[in-house]
Amino acid sequence: MTPINYNHLYYFYTVAIEGSITKASSNLHLTPQTISGQITTFETQIGVKLFERQGKKLILSEMGHLIYDYAQEIFQLGGELKKVILSKEPARWTTFTVGVAGVIPKVMAYQLLNPVLLMNESIRLICKEGDQESLLAELAVNRLDLVLTDQPLQMGSRVKAYNHHLTESGFTFFATKSLALNCQNDFPHSLNGQPFLLQGKNTAVKQRLSDWFDKNHISPNIVAEFDDSALMKSFGQEGYGIFTAPTLIEKTIVSRYHVGIIGRTDDFKEHYYVISPERKLKHPAILEIVNAAVKN
C-alpha cells in the first residue's frame, strides 16, 4: 500500500473539525477547490469514503470516524513534538487515557480520577466516555490504558484484561427539600407511591434497586428512566421525583443540586472497578487511582 500522505490526512482532519470545506479552506488559507480535490485524491488512495453529505453539512462516514480518531492522536503528537523541538527539552509528561463508562456519575468519576492530577509526575489525563463494550474494544487494541466502570469484566470475555476492585458505596435518596422533608419519616416505606427517577437499563444498580423495593414492599411511581445520571439529577432538582446516588458523593450532590436527603441504605451497593490490560498493576497513574481509593 502507498504510504499515507499526511498533508491529505491533515486536510481531512481540518474539514472534519470545521464541518465544512469552506471553513477549512479559510483556516488552511487554501481554496475550497484545492481542499475538495485533495480529499477526493485521499479517498481514492485509501479506497474509503470519508464523508457523507447531509444538506449543506459534511458528516463523517463510519470509516471517517475511525480515521478521524487516529488523525487526532497523530496531530496531537505532532503538536507536542513541535513544542519539544522549539523548547529543545524532552517532554516531561505522560499521557494517560481512561475510558469512563457513561453510567458512572460524573462526580464519582472525578473523585476516582482526581488523584492522577495530583501526582508529582506530570500526567496528561485524557478521558473518553462510552458504553463498556466499546471501551473494552478500545482497551483491547491499546487505545486506552484503563476502563473505569461499575461492572467487572465477565468470565469468558474475548478481551484479555483484568478487574481491579476500587471501592463500593451504599446509596442515598434525594429530592427537592420540600419533597425530602415529607418523605423522611418512616423511610424507606415513605417512598411508596412517590414519584421516582430510576437509572436506565444499562446500569448495574437498577436491578439491585428494584430488588430492594420488592424486598421492602415499596412501589414507587416510576416517572422516568435515565442512562445519564447527570440528567436524572437535573430532573430531580426540578422536582420531578426522588432519585438515588452513591453515598460517597452525597455532599457534592446536595451542594450542586440544592436538594435534600431523605435517607440512606447499605442494603444494596454500587461497586466500582478499573479494568486494565495487566494483572499486576505497574502504570504509576493506575497505581495512584487504586491506592487513593483504598485509603478512602
Image (spheres, rainbow, N blue to C red):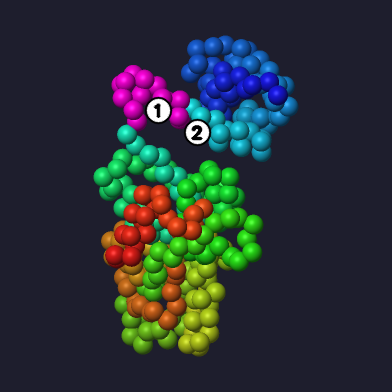
Q: How many marks?
A: 2
Lateral position of residue 2 relative to residue 284, left or right? right
Residue 81 part of the magenta segment:
yes
Compared with residue 130, is residue 104 higher up or lower down, i.e. above or below?
below
Q: Nearer the viewer, residue 76 or 90?
A: 90
Specify the segment rendered in magenta: 76-91
- Residue type at mark 1 is Glu
Identify the residue at image location x=37%, y=55%: 287
Rendered location of residue 7, percent (x, y): 56, 18
Pointer 2 residue: 73
Rendered location of residue 178, percent (x, y): 32, 73
Rendered location of residue 33, percent (x, y): 63, 13
Compared with residue 115, is residue 189 higher up or lower down, i.e. above or below?
below
Lateral position of residue 13 relative to residue 48, left or right? left
Residue 238 shows up from this direction: no
Q: Where residue 80 is drawn, which disc sits there? A: 1
